[in-house]
Image (cartoon, rainbow, N blue to C red):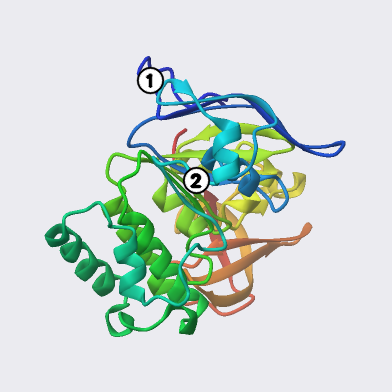
Amino acid sequence: MSTAASSSSEIPVLSLEGVGHHYGAETVFSHVCWRLEAGSRWSLLGSSGEGKSTLLGIMAGAVALQEGRMHFQGAPYAEQHQALLGKHPAIGYLAQEDQLQPVLSVVDNIAQAQRHVPEAQAKVYRKEALGRLGLAALARQPVRELSGGQRQRVALAALLAGNWSLILLDEPFGELDFPWRIAARRFLEDHAGEAAVVLVSHDPAEALPFAQTVAYLHAGRLQIPGSPRRVFHHPSSLNLARITGEINELDAAWQAHFHTKESLVRPAHIRKVEAGGVRVFLKEKAMGAGGERWWIGQENSPLLLQMAAPPEAVLDKGAPLKASIKKPPR
């Protein structure tokens, strides 16, 4: 597991060297080293209280740097000046509390972010943003009259109207319904351009599909466990496994039953097979967001494992089946 983002000799958009933050005597994180290259796509993960929003705020210049050094495009980052202003001219920052003007309309909030864009180009963007983010019917409505989810979509549209070298997003889809989360993420992907992007999210369904690389803040240290595929199929720790999706924790009895040393197994890793495999019993089943789920058991272990039900399979509770564990290669 690496603790550095890249060995590239190119000058990164932003680099952090030994960055730390404290609340009184309590250390939130320390010795954070991170290189953000142009065009890179990151998801920053971690349990609540690990300091993800604080780290994002430091990178944005909205929180004063207490410890370590930062460089923006090779030059020292003006920490004190930017902490006072709370805004860097080349960094787009969307905090959990948006900076929209509540008395202005939806379209005027977006237009404010386009002050330096030729009007013909700005109009094309506004039309696309309003349409794709479901805001066309609300274009002339004051932002103060919108729901939280509607405001989030306006805030994202306004942010992406700017021209940034670095985009920092703190839970930007948290109040959106599932279809709008998908639409908003795709809009972000289409309009981030060559900016480096860091997305903070508690939802693995939005964090993993977006990222090229995952950063993981845990116990005061920043780790770079790798690609979303690696993190999902081969998580480096139980905590990382838990925050990136459903996970089965195999005890010694289950490991012996499946003839495996694997201890962390996703439901998708357990397959119903016709030949080979081991004998288990279907104990429970229920529908979930990703389809039907089965809970399987065996005689000598009280622990049930969750698996994704094959779409063609029809079994009653209590029925025996054969199952095997198969993970993609590392």
How crowded pointer 2 is (Cα within 10 Å; few <14, some 14-19, many 20+) is rated as some
* Left or right, residue 153 beside residue 265: left
Residue at (23% x, 67% y) in the render: 126
* Left or right, residue 219 beside residue 110: right
Residue at (52% x, 76% y) in the render: 148
CA distance separating discs 1 and 2: 22 Å
Which residue is more in the foreground, 330 or 82? 82
Residue 57 screen position, x and y as percent = 59, 45
Picture quarter containing residue 238? Answer: top right
Residue 234, above or below 248: above
How crowded pointer 1 is (Cα within 10 Å; few <14, some 14-19, many 20+) is rated as some
For label 1, the SS is: loop
Residue at (20% x, 60% y) in the render: 122
The three-letter amino acid code for the residue at tag 1 is Ile
Residue 311, above or below 156: below
Picture quarter containing residue 247? Answer: bottom right
> Does the rendering let one see residue 234?
no
* Left or right, residue 304 beside residue 321: right
Residue at (62% x, 36% y) in the render: 236
Outermost residue toward the top in this view: 9
Residue 67 screen position, x and y as percent = 69, 27
Q: Quadrant location of the N terminus?
A: top right
Q: Which mark is residue 87?
A: 2
Q: Which mark is residue 11?
A: 1
The three-letter amino acid code for the residue at tag 2 is Lys
Residue 5, above or below 324: above
> Does the rendering let one see residue 70?
yes
Outermost residue toward the left in this view: 120
Residue 317 screen position, x and y as percent = 61, 78
